[in-house]
Amino acid sequence: MLDLGRRIRPGISEIQPYVPGLTDDQLKHTYGLSRVVKLNANENALGASPMALAAIREEMNMLHHYPDGSSDLLRRAIAEFHGLKQEHVLVGNGSDDLIKLLSETFLDPGDEIVVPHPSFSQYTFGAYIMRANVKPVSLTADFRYDVEAFLKEVNEKTKLVYLCSPNNPTGDVATQEAVEWLLERLPENVVLIIDLAYNDFSTRPDRVMETSKLLEDPRVVLIHTFSKLYGLAGLRVGYGLANPELWSFVNRVREPFNVNRLAQRAAAAALADEGHRTASVQHALRAREFYRDLANELGLTAMPTEANFVLLHTGDGAKTTQKLMEQGVMVRTGFRGLEEYVRITFGTDEENELCASALKKTL
Ligand SMILES: Cc1ncc(COP(=O)(O)O)c(C=O)c1O
């Protein structure tokens, strides 16, 4: 009889499938709720860019045609936005796609990657599918980056080093100075990937910025997404900025049509939607203050955040999450090492008020 377990590639059965939070429909069904406030996936409280939505409507009647496999229009728009050349840009089916592509391009069994801990899980996932090993580097006790600790984990097996800025789920940034310090010392054959998914929400002047100077270094890859600031998480589109030669290799493992038609058009339109971008950042800044004040009022610790979410210390993250869920408010917990915390995504003003009153009842 066929024994599938013996036919699959080594290492596959050890991978834990990604477990997303419950969808709002699942939650409504489980708890018999009529309304759910979804604050568990760091999505944009203001919704999608209206200009992106208009572009999608226009593109709908073209869906019987394949998309442009090289996403030229979108890559050009991104390049212009950042003052770079189109060859510096690769787009993906979400930035998850780019992380997987980079892993497939660089990693062999036994290679190593260095990642922040705690941080976004997909860096580790990318290593596991290639049977590479993961060296986690703990953040400091107050969840800051210690780049010296990163460097200590780098050896001749290291291929990729990841930074996430602001870090998910803790919220602090990697500074430009820290990144420059690291680049000066990293071996020349190690690639530094900086995930900037939430960077546009940050106002810290010392945060790492994608200056063209940074990209002159052939080891640097900067990853962005349209899922957060631009509110297009459901479409799946992200992009990477790096040296054209690096992309020429990654391009060989990319699926031919990895970004769909609607995503390409919508993302290009979203980039031009200055109004939506500014409103989204302003909203996140106000929400940041709202949760800081709420934490003070409740006597809880909220970690300083530069993103559109906040990590809140409640003592027992699972219990808080459960109690909030029963009241129709979805937050995220279960990050390894952060069992005492919940991560709350900023919602609309009304959603944040609902979350606050649910939290007050819970505690
Ligand atoms: C740090 C970070 N990077 C990347 C992603 C994935 O983004 P995308 O929706 O573009 O795949 C997320 C999503 O939560 C994230 O938190």
Image (spheres, rainbow, N blue to C red):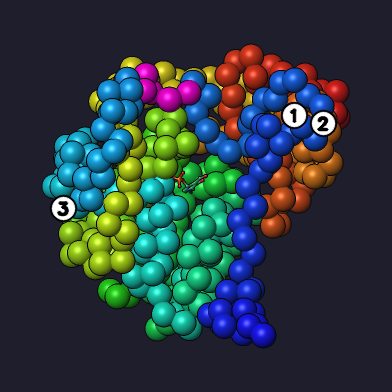
| Magenta stretch, residue numbers | 47-53
**Distance between mark 2 and mark 1 Cα atoms:** 6 Å
Pick out the residue farthest to the top: 350
Question: What kind of element bears circle 1?
Answer: helix
Q: Residue at x 67, y 25 (%)?
A: 37
**Residue 306 belongs to magenta span:** no
> What residue would you read off at disc 2?
31
Residue bearing mark 1: 28
Q: Position of residue 266 (x, y in %)?
A: 32, 31
Q: Is residue 113 left or right of residue 187?
A: right
Q: For marks 1 and 3, give the CA distance.
A: 46 Å
* Disc on the earlier residue, 1 or 3: 1
Magenta stretch containing residue 52, yes or no? yes
Looking at the rendering, which quadrant does residue 263 occupy? top left
Q: Are marks 2 and 1 in contact (CB under 8 Å)?
A: yes
In this rendering, the answer to whether 255 lies above or below 92 is below
Q: Residue at x 41, y 47 (%)?
A: 94
In the rendered image, which quarter contains the N terminus?
bottom right
Numbered disc in front, either 1 or 3: 1
Which of the 4 image quarters holds residue 64? top left
How many numbered marks appear? 3
Amino acid type, mark 1: Lys
Quarter containing the C terminus: top right
Asked whether the beta carbons under mark 1 and mark 3 sit within 8 Å of each other, the answer is no
**Does the residue tagged 3 have its C-beta within 8 Å of any atom of ligand 1?**
no
Where disc 3 sits, the SS reads helix
Q: Residue furthest left?
A: 85
Residue type marked 3: Glu
Q: Name the amino acid, label 2.
A: Tyr
Q: Which mark is residue 87?
A: 3
- On the rendered structure, is 352 left or right of 278? right
